Amino acid sequence: MALSLVVTPVAMLLELVICFLGFYLGYTKKKAYGYLFAVTFLLFALFDYLGQAGLDADSLAIVNLVAVLAALAGMYLVLQEK
């Protein structure tokens, strides 16, 4: 249990760094998948935060599903790029 008190905030920080990098990619390179990955990792950070805050499992499942769908759409765009 004590390990999660250290690992979760570190993971959240790294997720927010990836979020920032995704927004940077989307803005500077004009790549839509950058924004999608930014939203994905923002939602993952939100998922971790809300899980620590004690939000119910159903709400967390919805946040997780939306994050995964954003990642799937971003990956689709990456694969379509030539």
Image: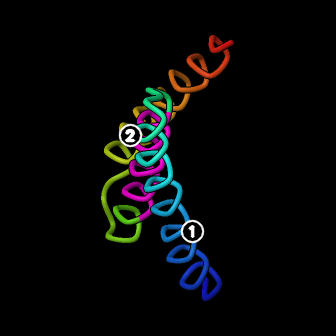
Q: Position of residue 56 (x, y in %)?
A: 32, 54
Q: Magenta includes 37? A: yes
Q: Is residue 62 above or below residue 72?
A: below
Region of the chain picked out in magenta, as a range: 34-48
Residue depicted at x 57% and y 68%: 11
Q: Position of residue 9 (x, y in %)?
A: 50, 77
Q: Is residue 81 above or below residue 46?
A: above
Q: Position of residue 18 (x, y in %)?
A: 53, 55
Q: Which mark is residue 44?
A: none
Q: Magenta includes 36? A: yes
Secondary structure of the residue carrying tag 2 is helix
Front residue of 54 and 21: 21
Can you name the residue that lies furthest to the bottom here? 2
Work out which quarter of the rendered image holds the C terminus and state it. Answer: top right
- Which residue is label 2 attached to? 27
- Amino acid type, label 1: Ala
Mark nearer the N terminus (2 vs 1): 1
Residue 80 image-quadrant placement: top right
Q: Position of residue 23 (x, y in %)?
A: 41, 46
The local crowd at label 2, few if under 14, some if 14 to 19, many if 20 or more residues have their Cα within 10 Å, is few
Question: Which of the colour schemes (rainbow, by chain, secondary structure, one colour) is used?
Answer: rainbow
Q: Main secondary structure of the magenta part?
A: helix
Residue depicted at x 67% and y 16%: 79
Front residue of 66 and 81: 81
Q: Is residue 17 above or below residue 35?
A: below
Residue depicted at x 40% and y 70%: 52
- Which residue is label 1 attached to? 11
- Amino acid type, label 2: Tyr
